[in-house]
Amino acid sequence: MYFLYIFSHLSILIFISSTLNAEQNISPRLNSTIDWDQAYRDHLNVKLSENEAISKFRSASLQEIDNVTLPVLILKKQSVRSTPKFFGQGRSYVATYSLPKAKLSIIGSATLISLTDDSTYDMYKNTNTFEVTLDGADYSFIKYGASYILRLSCDEPTFDMRCTTPKFLNGLANQLIVAGGKAQE
């Protein structure tokens, strides 16, 4: 009986020790360096016809947009007709659009996970990734130093071509414009 008592306590100590060691090996999160000069230039180069979409979006969520510390990307007016619902949270945000038989979310984050080898970041910073998910697809990329995901949830994900091939999300990624955000003070 005494053996079981010692063994159970020893097992708990081993578990706690391994948990502490595992926590020490977690990569730290870092604030990404945002290329605000490029984001501002791109914002200024938006066609006059797109300013209506930006104005409508900003008027609906101005306070939240200006509290986000990364470039807020939205779709050009001709990409979708609806104004997105917006939720900002300092170093991240989500903008959601209703599409026919689908929902699109643009998720942005200015927090990166530190890699042990800095050259790994350079290798992936210009890479776009498409992944099929249970209810749709994700298209991930880095722009202006921040990470973004276009997440598409489809009513019929296995049959909807927008969710099974990267063409649709890649096209939308090329239609994104800077609508706000500001440098961290």
Image (cartoon, rainbow, N blue to C red):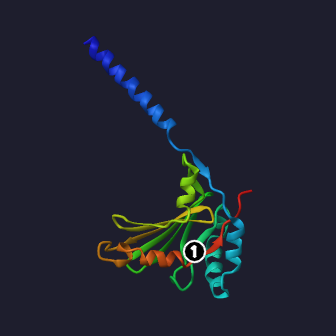
> Could you tell me which secondary element the residue under label 1 belongs to?
strand
> Measured from the top left, where is residue 96 in percent x and y?
50, 71
Residue 124 percent coordinates (x, y): 52, 60
The single residue placed furthest to the right in the displayed view is: 185
Residue drawn at the location 36% of the way across and 64% of the way down: 133
Return the residue nearer the eye: 61 or 50. 50
Please, which residue is most extreme toward the top here? 2
Q: Residue at x 31, y 74 (%)?
A: 156
How many tags in the picture?
1
- In which image quadrant can residue 19 be found? top left
Vertical order, 33 against 169 (above or below): above
Which image quarter is the C terminus in?
bottom right
Above or below: residue 8 compared with residue 149? above
Residue identified by numbered label 1:
74
Estimate the x, y position of residue 126 in percent, counting from the top left: 55, 65
Give the side of residue 167 with respect to residue 73, left or right. Answer: left
Quadrant of the rendered structure where residue 143 is? bottom right
Badge 1, how many Cα within 10 Å: few under 14, some, many 20+? many
Compared with residue 38, is residue 1 higher up or lower down, i.e. above or below?
above
> Quadrant of the image for the N terminus?
top left
